[in-house]
Amino acid sequence: MAGKKGQDNSKKAAGNARKADSAAKKSAAADAEREVAEGEKWQQGAKNTSKKYVPIPTWHDGA
C-alpha cells in the first residue's frame, strides 16, 4: 500500500505542460521564420505587372 494510486502528480503535470508550451512556441517561431523566408523567395522572382494609371484627359470648358 505504498504510494497513492490514481492521483495526478501536479509537479509532473506542470512540467509536462511547460515543456509542451515551450515546444509550441519554438514550433511557431520556426514556422513564422520559414514563412518569411518563403515570402522573400517568391518576391525575388516576382515582377510588377500592374499598369500605370493614366488619367483620361477631359477637354471641357466648364460651359
Image (spheres, rainbow, N blue to C red):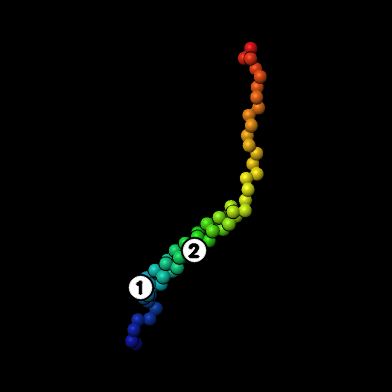
Residue situated furthest top in the rendering: 63
Residue 9 screen position, x and y as percent: 36, 75
Q: Which amino acid does label 2 sit on?
A: Ala
Q: Is residue 3 visible?
A: yes
Figure label count:
2
Q: Distance between the residues labelled 2 and 1?
A: 30 Å
Residue at (41%, 70%) from the top-left corner? 19
Quarter of the image that includes the N terminus: bottom left
Q: Which of 32 and 56 is in front in this view?
A: 56
Badge 2 density bin: few <14, some 14–19, many ≥20, Cα 10 Å: few
Query: CB under 8 Å between callouts 2 and 1?
Result: no
Q: Nearer the viewer, residue 26 or 2?
A: 26
Query: In what element is the residue under mark 1?
Result: helix
Q: Which of 25 and 7 is in front in this view?
A: 25
Location of residue 43 with respect to 23 vertically, above or below: above
Q: Is residue 17 visible?
A: no
Quarter of the image that includes the C terminus: top right
Residue at (35%, 73%) from the top-left corner? 10
Task: Point out which mark residue 30 bears.
Answer: 2
If you read the primary sequence from the N terminus, does the residue marked by circle 2 or circle 1 appear first? 1
Task: Point out which mark residue 10 bears.
Answer: 1
Residue at (38%, 72%) from the top-left corner? 15
Task: Point out which mark residue 26 bears.
Answer: none
Location of residue 24 with respect to 40 vertically, above or below: below
Residue 56 screen position, x and y as percent: 65, 27
Query: In what element is the residue under mark 2?
Result: helix
Residue situated furthest left in the rendering: 2
Q: In which quarter of the image is residue 55?
A: top right
Residue 24 screen position, x and y as percent: 46, 65
In the displayed structure image, the side of residue 51 where residue 27 appears, left or right: left
Location of residue 30 with respect to 62 vertically, above or below: below
Residue 46 screen position, x and y as percent: 62, 51
